[in-house]
Amino acid sequence: MDNASYRFGEKLTLEITGESHGPFVRAVLSGLPAGFCPDQEELRSFMLRRASSGKTGATERHEDDVPEFTAGLRDGCTDGSPLVIRIANADVRTQDYDTLSRVPRPGHADLAAYRKYGFIPSGGGAFSGRMTAPLCAAGGIVIQLLRERGIGIFSHLFSVGEVFDIPYDPMAPTAENCPDFPAVSPRYAKLMKMEIESAMRAGDSVGGVIECAVRGLPAGLGGPLYEGVEGAIASAVFAVPAVKGIEFGSGFSSARMRGSANNDGYRIRDDEVAFESNCSGGILGGITTGMPLIFRTAVKPTPSIALPQHSVDLKRMEDTVLEVKGRHDTCIALRALPAIEASCALALYDMILKEET
Ligand SMILES: Cc1cc2nc3c(=O)[nH]c(=O)nc-3n(C[C@H](O)[C@H](O)[C@H](O)COP(=O)(O)O)c2cc1C
């Protein structure tokens, strides 16, 4: 597992290496055009949206997450070779994980890893949310490249537990979130924070749904069967730990609808074909329609919780009760928004490059 790397994409490829308690995590991004000069300030702000500092119920592990470019940039601009981004793992406390080397956390990857590799990786190893730091560094750059093409990606917390934000208008989603919380409505932002705080006080955790929108995508990207945009985005998004579901447009609720409600009618407006609605979420037949692309990602509650749970001691082969100590997020969805945007950007840019060659 130590030297493993995890790879996505065909024309634009991302390789992620490292693990939570190693010295660093790393991204290698290949297929970028030469001469692109990423805005480092913007990248830093993007990465801060993933960082724990100041977030309700987030882990107290402090990660500065300053991306260090060890190859691929010359005078601040891409030189056409693979971009290598290294992020140091700071503030690692392996002692928090002593018991966890033999007692798997229910809901985490510990037991699955033990069965596959014969040991439980410290701090979740490559299964840790830490792996989304290099993902966000790479994806943050691709988001900037997409913006040069007029394509914008943004997201908000659609729900936390049973608290729901105002959904995006699928015809014209706005990119405006509250200044201090990634929800559109200040009222629901407050209720979501209270929901996270309440789970934290109970020693528990809470799940959430992230709604993501892409504006400015040209019509005609993607294709049938395995060429579809949904499949490409889903494959990138499912790499984010704790993601358990994805739906596009009216998604699962379309299964409860009649065709007359779910079909998006057409009208001629200004000599163009216009959509009357956007239940399809901007994709039909795996191909972008030119309408905003809308998808929602379900993020499960954090597995590591302080409440007592049934587990087993794998050394002694006996039942035990586990109360997870250490520093853990209460609501992963709150930190995962940029990771979802980054994953979406990688999938779309890879598709764009494939269609251009
Ligand atoms: C940004 C982020 C932060 C996370 N933080 C934690 C955490 O503090 N504690 C925890 O148990 N899991 C955390 N996770 C989730 C686990 O990594 C994940 O649930 C685990 O690897 C099992 O994988 P699965 O849930 O995809 O099946 C985090 C995930 C992300 C994306």
Image: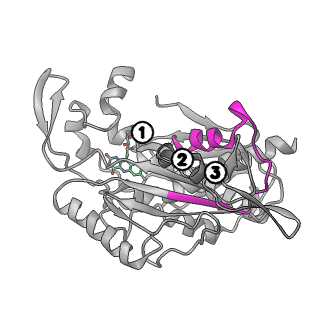
Q: Which of label 2 and label 1 is nearer to you? A: 2
Residue of label 1: 127
The quadrant of the picture occupied by the C terminus is top right
* Amino acid type at image mark 3: Asn
Front position in the image: 218 or 2: 218
Q: CA distance from mark 2 to mark 1?
A: 40 Å
**Residue type, label 2:** Arg
Compare marks 2 and 1 and give the one earlier in the sequence.
1
> Is 82 or 184 nearer to us in this picture?
184
Q: Is residue 198 left or right of residue 302?
A: left
Whether 18 is among the magenta residues is no
- Which residue is labeled 2 in the image? 258
Q: What's drawn in magenta, residue-wise?
A: 211-238
Q: Is residue 63 above or below residue 302?
A: below
> Could one spot residue 71 in this view of the protein?
yes
| Mark 3 and mark 1: Cα distance apart in space | 40 Å
Q: Residues within 10 Å of mark 2 (few under 14, many from 20)?
A: few
Q: Which residue is mark 3?
A: 263
> What label does residue 100 carry, if any?
none
